[in-house]
Image (cartoon, rainbow, N blue to C red):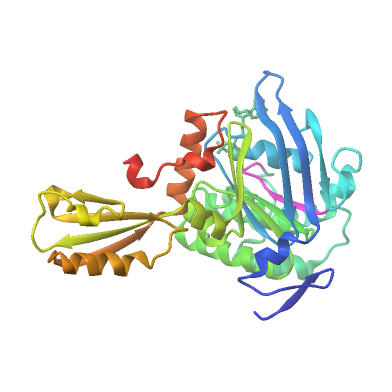
Amino acid sequence: MGNEIVADGAYEIRGIGVTLLRQMPAVISISQLTKTYASDLKALKHIDLEIHRGEIFALLGPNGAGKTTLISVVCGIVTPTTGTVLVDGHDIVREYRAARSKIGLVPQELHTDMFESVWATVNFSRGLFGHAPNPAHLEKVLRDLSLWDKRNDKIMTLSGGMKRRVLIAKALAHEPEILFLDEPTAGVDVELRRDMWALVRRLRESGVTIILTTHYIDEAEEMADRIGVINKGELIVVEEKVGLMKKLGKKQLTLHLLEPLASLPLELSDWRLALKLGGSEIEYTFDGREEQTRIPALLRRLDELGIGFKDLQTRQSSLEDIFVSLVKAQSDHPWSAPLASVPSPSERA
Ligand SMILES: Nc1ncnc2c1ncn2[C@@H]1O[C@H](COP(=O)(O)OP(=O)(O)OP(=O)(O)O)[C@@H](O)[C@H]1O
Ligand SMILES: [Mg+2]
């Protein structure tokens, strides 16, 4: 896809578009949002978050972190205790209908009328938002989700994965500008997962803003422009995915030596090295910000010292490594900023 106008005359070029998206007005503005349930449980604590128009935002967090609560507040299903949420400028409490009409929600839990047909359910969802019937749109949605052949079947006769597709079809029935997907791929097969990713990308191409939660971190790594990490009701990180991986990611170079070393020579003390596997491997760990130009110098120094190697491997920490470190760091030191003290995957091992 080439250049395209996404809004307000701002040009987005795929790949580098995230920076430009940041300068665009927020489509969702959440400020100082707190939710305390009747049980006195503080599910959300002072959340500030802006979602940019046209982005894919992945919200990550362990079970019970507050992801569904946050989504439910924005969608008007759960009332906030304090704070404000604006959806395209509309306050979710005072202007509930206007705010809600912008949003499609694919909920985490499956609950829909089991005795209705697929077509009736999806058509009804569209009507709920006051839209005129549009069979052509519904047909496209059902075909996109491979549900067209099932359109006359009762929902109770569908498999779990198909029921999940029906939830997505319902959310898309009224052509929302913002789509929330709460764990859309939990328990679905590989094929549906891939279809879902393709569908999400197509929706984004058509200008829809997407907020998804997932426990499959590779999904966030694959799809998201930005990542938010929530833990125990606190939003601990919001970052562009690429920046997050660069900032907190570690890289590791492993050299498999021809002859084991008893210890690391002093001449190698300029690099952060570790001797592994009884001296038969040298492991060099460096962070994503560090210049990789130090590798040739290391290899030259090894050559000068007569240390030969037969193979080498590099490894980069995944978003999953980073996520686990962030959540762990916050759980260990809930009052300190986790960013400064995130241990590397190797340090954690
Ligand atoms: N209706 C409710 N009444 C009381 N407590 C609730 C209610 N809904 C959620 N909670 C609590 O709020 C906290 C956050 O729950 P939430 O469902 O938002 O988590 P989540 O991040 O979506 O978790 P998961 O990954 O398991 O879906 C949990 O401790 C949960 O038990
Ligand atoms: Mg949830």
Is residue 203 in sight in this rendering? Answer: no
Is residue 238 in sight in this rendering? Answer: yes
Nearer to the camera, 170 or 233:
233
Residue 208 lies within the magenta run: no
Quarter of the image with the N terminus is bottom right
Residue that sits furthest to the top in the current view: 39
Quarter of the image with the C terminus is top left
Residue range of the region highlighted in magenta in the rendering? 102-111
Nearer to the camera, 67 or 299:
299
- Horizontally, residue 209 falls left or right of residue 275, namely right
- Horizontally, residue 173 falls left or right of residue 132, namely left
User: In terms of image quadrants, where is residue 179?
Assistant: bottom right
Q: How many marks?
A: 0
Up the image or down, 306 lies above or below 283; here it is below
Look at 67% across and 18% down and name the residue there: 39
Nearer to the camera, 58 or 125:
58
Most common SS among magenta residues: loop
Look at 70% across and 79% down and name the residue there: 3
User: In terms of image quadrants, where is residue 132?
Assistant: bottom right
Image coordinates for residue 108, horizontal then vertical, percent = 61, 43
Image coordinates for residue 80, horizontal then vertical, percent = 78, 32
Look at 49% across and 45% down and name the residue there: 323
Residue that sits furthest to the front in the current view: 267
